[in-house]
Amino acid sequence: MFYKSFPLLVIGLWGVMVLPLPNKVNAITPLTRAEIQDLRNMVQLIPKDKLKKRPARKLDAMTPGDGLSTGRASLADLRFNDGSLARVGEQALFQFLPKTRDFKLSNGTVLLLIPPGRGQTRIQTPSAAAAIRGSALFVRYDQQTDTTIVGALTNSGIEVSNKEGSETKVLEAGQMIILIKGEFQSLYDFDLRNFYETSELVRELDLNRQSPVPTPDPAITSVQAETTAALEAQPSIKGEGVIEMRLTRPNSPTETTPVTSAEKSPNTSTETTSVTSTEKSTNTPTEPTPVTPTEPTPVTPTELPST
């Protein structure tokens, strides 16, 4: 793969394996319990026996093996016994596994905020797994295309490996990588500042510390320290790239669902933030050439269906 800029890229967030570098040893705090801290619209609780799926309620408790599913324009915030937060986006299927720090994402998007010192945390998709050790990232899996996207929000040595584990990439804050069918496709830089200002995925979490009121939650505060440090360290993003990341926050009386969309599907909602492509798609055998010498056509390495 080699670096290149592209004028427009339309994607969704989809499946991969992400692992933090083992540069220090942390005590492992097992995940034993979660609570639904907040939810919007259609969220269903799936007990581990999968026999009595029911509508979820705020403050519902979850134990290892339980799962959540979300409908269109829906969202759920889960808080775990170690202070970690998982924000589950629309049309997702999410579960946490017994006797581990492992999560399973079978479809949709999740944002993970893991306070430092809790031990390695992994999130699995059908084609890969993502793991962090005290940091923040987002993962999206699209089961229809067997595609994973992982984006890093902190400089915490996040490693991304393909399904077989034969290739590994290290993500820095503000980098996003795409895998399709377990194989690496492209690596992109995205503007963290723009992301925090425009993304519904991180709304009200104050990961860029713009609120004049400090966050009273010490676990989230420790994550904010890492996200803010990464934001301050990121150089300006140069280039023409625009990425449309699709995740909807449920409608409320004072806000509307974003409608910035160049491509629509039943699962699609949109957010826009600046991005610069840093790697060419590995599966693209040739590059389109301009239609005429005076009318160049924008080149995109890949255009993926969104969810």
Image: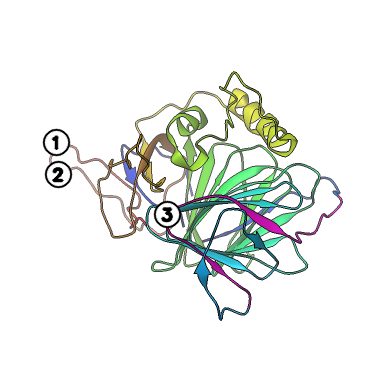
Q: Secondary structure at mark 1?
A: loop
Mark 3 or 1, closer to the camera? 3
Label 1, residues with CA under 10 Å away: few <14, some 14-19, many ≥20: few
**CA–CA distance between discs 3 and 1?**
47 Å
Are discs 3 and 1 less than 8 Å apart at CB?
Answer: no
Disc 1 marks which amino acid?
Glu
Tag count = 3
For label 2, the residue is: 291
Q: Identify the residue at horizontal 61%, vertical 73% (top origin).
A: 47
* Residue position marked by numbered label 3 in the rendering: 41
Q: What type is the residue that disc 2 sits on?
A: Val
- Residue 50 sits in quarter: bottom right
Q: Estimate the x, y position of residue 31 in percent, counting from the top left.
A: 75, 59
Where are the magenta residues, as a range?
Answer: 27-48
CB atoms at circles 3 and 2 under 8 Å apart?
A: no
Query: What's the distance in space between the residues labelled 2 and 1, CA to CA?
Result: 6 Å
Labels 3, 2: front one = 3
Residue 133 forms part of the magenta stretch = no
Relative to 219, say whether 247 is above or below. Answer: below
Q: Residue at x 69, y 46 (%)?
A: 114
- Kindly identify which numbered label has been placed on residue 62: none
x and y, in percent, of residue 292 in the image: 12, 40
Residue at left offset 83%, top offset 55%? 28
Q: Quadrant of residue 274?
A: top left
Q: Is residue 67 left or right of residue 217?
A: left
Residue 303 or residue 265, whichever sits in front: 265
- Asked if labels 1 and 2 touch by Cβ distance under 8 angstroms, the answer is yes
Q: Amino acid at mark 3?
A: Asn
- Characterize the local packing of mark 2: few (<14), some (14-19) or many (20 or more) Cα atoms within 10 angstroms: few
Numbered circle sitting on residue 295 = 1
